[in-house]
Image: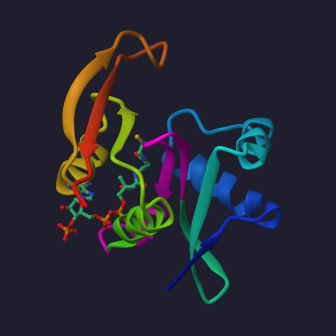
Amino acid sequence: MKIRPMEASDLEAAMEIDALCLAVPWTAGIWRTELESPLGLHLVAEEEGWILGQIGVKSILDELHITTIAIRPEHRRAGVARTLFEAVLDEFPKAREVYLEVRPSNEGARNFYSSLGFRETGRRPRYYGDEDAILMTSSLRR
Ligand SMILES: CC(C)(COP(=O)(O)OP(=O)(O)OC[C@H]1O[C@@H](n2cnc3c(N)ncnc32)[C@H](O)[C@@H]1OP(=O)(O)O)[C@@H](O)C(=O)NCCC(=O)NCCS
C-alpha cells in the first residue's frame, strides 16, 4: 500500500468512497475548495492503482483539524486509516494538538479515534443539523 497526496484525478474515486462511507458526502465543489486550500493536506492510500481511502486535514498554527477520513468498507480493520493518520502526523512535525468532530452515533469512528489516543473534549450542538458533534482531541507529545 502506498500513501501519496491526493490529486484532482482522484476526485472521482474519493467521491465514490465518500458516498459509500459518509452520511453527508462532500460535493465536488466542497472537495475542490478543500483541495485548493493552502491550509489543507489530503492523502490517499492506494494499492495497485486502486484508492482504498483518504484523509483530509487543515493545519492552523500548531493545531491539526481532521476534516475527513473514509476507507472503503471491504478494506476496513486492516490499518489503512491508522496508516493515513500517521502519514499526516509525519507531514506536520510541529503540530501539538489534533482535533475532529464525530457523530455520537458513529461508534466505529469513535472507537477508531480512541484507539489513536483521542479523548472526548466537548460537544458542538446540532453541528450536523440532525445531530450534535462530539469534539475529540489528542495532544501530541513529541
Ligand atoms: C473509521 C474508519 C475511518 C476506520 O478505518 P479503518 O481503516 O478500518 O481503521 P484501522 O484499521 O486503521 O483501525 C485501527 C484501530 O481502530 C479501532 N477501530 C477501527 N474501526 C473500528 C470499529 N468499527 N469498531 C471498533 N474499533 C475500531 C481498532 O482498535 C483498530 O485496530 P484493530 O483493527 O487492530 O482492532 C472507517 O471505519 C470508515 O471509513 N468509516 C466510515 C467513515 C467515517 O465514519 N469517517 C469518520 C467520520 S468522523
Quadrant housing residue 59: top right
Query: Where 2 sits versus 19, above or below?
Result: below
Percent position of residue 10, x then y: 74, 65
User: Which residue lies at the image location 34% right of the left edge and 66% below the top edge?
Assistant: 82
Percent position of residue 125, x then y: 36, 10
**For ligand 1, which image quadrant applies?**
bottom left
Q: Nearer the viewer, residue 83 or 47?
A: 83
**Residue at the top extreme, as displayed:** 125
Percent position of residue 130, x then y: 44, 14
Quadrant housing residue 30: top right
User: Which residue lies at the image location 19% right of the left edge and 48% below the top edge?
Assistant: 114
User: Which residue lies at the image location 29% right of the left edge and 69% below the top edge?
Assistant: 77
Quadrant housing residue 27: top right
Percent position of residue 73, x then y: 43, 62
Q: Decide if residue 26 is on the left or right side of residue 23.
A: right
User: Which residue lies at the image location 78% right of the left edge and 46% below the top edge?
Assistant: 36
Q: Main secondary structure of the magenta part?
A: strand
- Report the label total: 0
Query: Where 13 sits versus 111, above or below?
Result: below
Q: Quadrant of the C terminus?
A: bottom left
Query: Where 109 sits versus 48, above or below?
Result: above
Residue 67 lies in the magenta stretch:
yes
What range of the chain is rendered magenta? 55-78
Q: Decide if residue 36 is on the left or right side of residue 129.
A: right
Residue 124 lies in the magenta stretch:
no
**Residue at the bottom extreme, as displayed:** 48
Q: Decide if residue 85 is on the left or right side of residue 129.
A: left
